[in-house]
Structure formats: structure tokens, C-alpha cells
Amino acid sequence: NTNGIIQMGLAENQLCFDLLESWLAKNPEAAAFKKNGESIFAELALFQDYHGLPAFKKAMVDFMAEIRGNKVTFDPNHLVLTAGATSANETFIFCLADPGEAVLIPTPYYPRFDRDLKWRTGVEIVPIHCTSSNGFQITETALEEAYQEAEKRNLRVKGVLVTNPSNPLGTTMTRNELYLLLSFVEDKGIHLISDEIYSGTAFSSPSFISVMEVLKDRNCDENSEVWQRVHVVYSLSKDLGLPGFRVGAIYSNDDMVVAAATKMSSFGLVSSQTQHLLSAMLSDKKLTKNYIAENHKRLKQRQKKLVSGLQKSGISCLNGNAGLFCWVDMRHLLRSNTFEAEMELWKKIVYEVHLNISPGSSCHCTEPGWFRVCFANLPERTLDLAMQRLKAFVGEYYNVPEV
């Protein structure tokens, strides 16, 4: 349907399916639930320990370390499997906060956090307002203002949650930001949750830095409070492009959090069949090494293509180096500097240009005119068509000169 709406609001990674499908074709036993030529179907079909299959947890932590350049390692005994990152984030909130308490999150942030973190937990989100003046980086002032705002609302702050790399910004956090966050949570006696589900998508410099790497750099005592209060969320939905498999993980240095999260994980387990298949896949180091490198290469090429296409329409982006999307600056296309004007522009782009993108207001951005545009969930020819449509629209309605 060449006149249909093109989905550019969905953060899926479809660029490397050929690598995974090729591996499956060469390793049919994994998908056929066989081991050494013998069927293990019955073994996988029966009840499993909800701690997860040991082989899969070992493969998972090794993959997490490999993505981080093996600068940090992870203990499988501190890993809790969940049905995707959505379940992991909600479980963390259940474990760390009570109804009526709060977590601080930097803006702009993933829109569904309003659902995932609040609906069933009763916990409030207080935004840490970040702005384009410094590329939406976190500052000490912004952290303190958010904390004070929570206090004014009589909300006890239990932690800070960040996405690194950022959704929707498509950027990695700097080492200075991570040091600032660790100092802040240590000073306040609160927790830090680092949602690192896009860690394997950092395709250009600066490289991705995990909060666990910074924790290690600080030579924190493993018995210290800050060591126990730093936690990580991971998933295979973005890095491997497998959101349908529903594989997420909680990682914590705190034994009590791991124990509580493990009990809660029984409400959202990963099937033993899925664990078996992915255990075999992630244990193949030749595959993972090639996949990580090729994924970075293809993401970089695709992001460059989107940025170039936008530039031809006179539209710029935040300088991104990770993720499956760009944070696009369309402030100059607004009729006025208001969120009403942003929604007016968004509706035109959806209903007239037939491109579905995400308005910044849905991400709680404080500045009208920013949009998240995804680039890894559609074929290259479809991206070309999308850019042609956008260029024609901007030229017709806004008289933007040829670039």
C-alpha cells in the first residue's frame, strides 16, 4: 500500500534478522528442541524452576558482558528473568517503593513508563526536567529541583530511573552524568535503576558506559550501601530484535531485591522453550561477536540515511549515537511555540503525510517541537518513501528551500 501510513513510531530492530535466521538454519536442533540428536521436548514442556534454566542465565550474563566490552561481569545468581523489560521495570518498582512514594525520571522519557511504573504499583513519577540547551543531559540542579518538587508534594523519593542509552533521545549517558547520579543517590540514600535495554545499539562514539562500569571505577566496597542500591534492567527486545520472545532481566547486587524479584517473577516467566533456544544461540560466541559488530554497522548506516533525508527537508536532529530512533527537531515548523501547535503539526504529519511518529509531549519533553522518529523497523525503500513524503510536505507548507 504505497499510500498507507508508514509506521515510524515503533522502536523495533529488524535490521539483522538474516543473521539469526541463518544461524537457525545451521543449528536446527535448537529450534527442534533436541540435544545431541535426542528430543528434550518433554523435559522442556514440564514445570521448571522459576529461577530459570542455569545454561540460559549463564549465556545471558555473558552476552551482557560482551556488549559492554567485557569491562564488567555479571553473576547469574544475581539475575532474575522476567517476561520482557516492562515486567522487569514494574517488578523493580514493586520491590523498592510503596504506593504513594516516588521515583525521579529525566525527561524526555519513554511514554509507557507512565503505565508500566504507576498503574499497579501506586508509585508516582516526578520528572527531572532536562533541556536542549545542553543536549538534554542531566544536571545537578535538575536533580535537586526534582527532589525538592517531590518533597513539596509530600512524596518520599525512593530512587532515580534512567534509560541508558536513552529512549527517546538516541544518546548514551556521559561518564560525568553517571558519576553525578551515583553521588546523588548515595547522598540521598535512594536507589538507582539503569534501564540498559538499548546497550547493544550504541553504534558510534562515544561508546556506551554501563552504570556497573562506573560503580567498578569508583572502587565501591561490595558491602557498601551504594553498591547494593544500583540495579540494571536488560532485555533482548532491542539488541537482538526479539520483542515477541518476551525476554527481560533484572540485575541487582542486593540479595533481598533478588529474592523478592525472583518470587514476583512467577507472574511473568520466560518459557523454558524460549530459554533453551536462546541459550544455544547466545552461547555461540562466533555468532554473538559477528552479530554485535554487524548490528552496530547497520544501525549506523540506517541512522545516517534518516539524518540525511531529514536534512534535505531542512530538519535537524539531536546528535545521536545509539538506539533505534532519532530525536528530531521540528520547532521551526510550529505555528507557535506551544504544545497545541506541536499536536497540530503531528496530526498533519500523520493524516496528510501518512507518517506515524511520536510527539515530544508524549515523552514529557518540556519544549514543543521535538519528535521521536524510528528507523530500524522498516525496509530501506520505505524509509526513502517516507523522506520523499516529508520533503514534499515541508516544501509545500513551509516553503523550505532546497538543501
Image (cartoon, grey):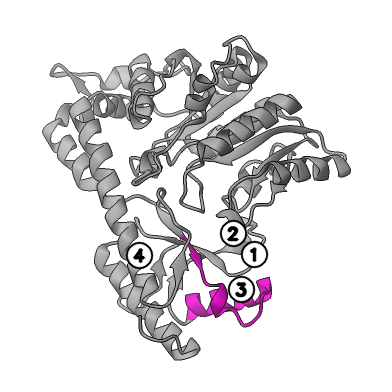
- The residue at which mark 1 appears reads as 367
Marks 4/3 in contact by CB < 8 Å: the verdict is no
Kindly indicate whether the residue at mark 3 contacts the one at mark 1 (C-beta within 8 angstroms).
Answer: no
Is the C-beta separation of discs 2 and 1 under 8 Å? Answer: yes
- Nearer the viewer's eye, disc 4 or disc 2? 2
How far apart are the alpha carbons under marks 2 and 1?
8 Å
Type of amino acid under label 4? Leu
Name the residue carrying label 4: 306
Magenta part of the chain: 327-351
Q: Nearer the viewer, mark 3 or mark 2?
A: 2
First reached walking from the N terminus: tag 1 or tag 4: 4
Give the residue pinned by disc 3.
343
Determine contact: label 4, label 2, CB under 8 Å: no
What residue would you read off at disc 2?
Answer: 132
Q: Mark 2 or mark 1: which comes first in sequence?
A: 2
Q: Toward the viewer: 24 or 77?
A: 77
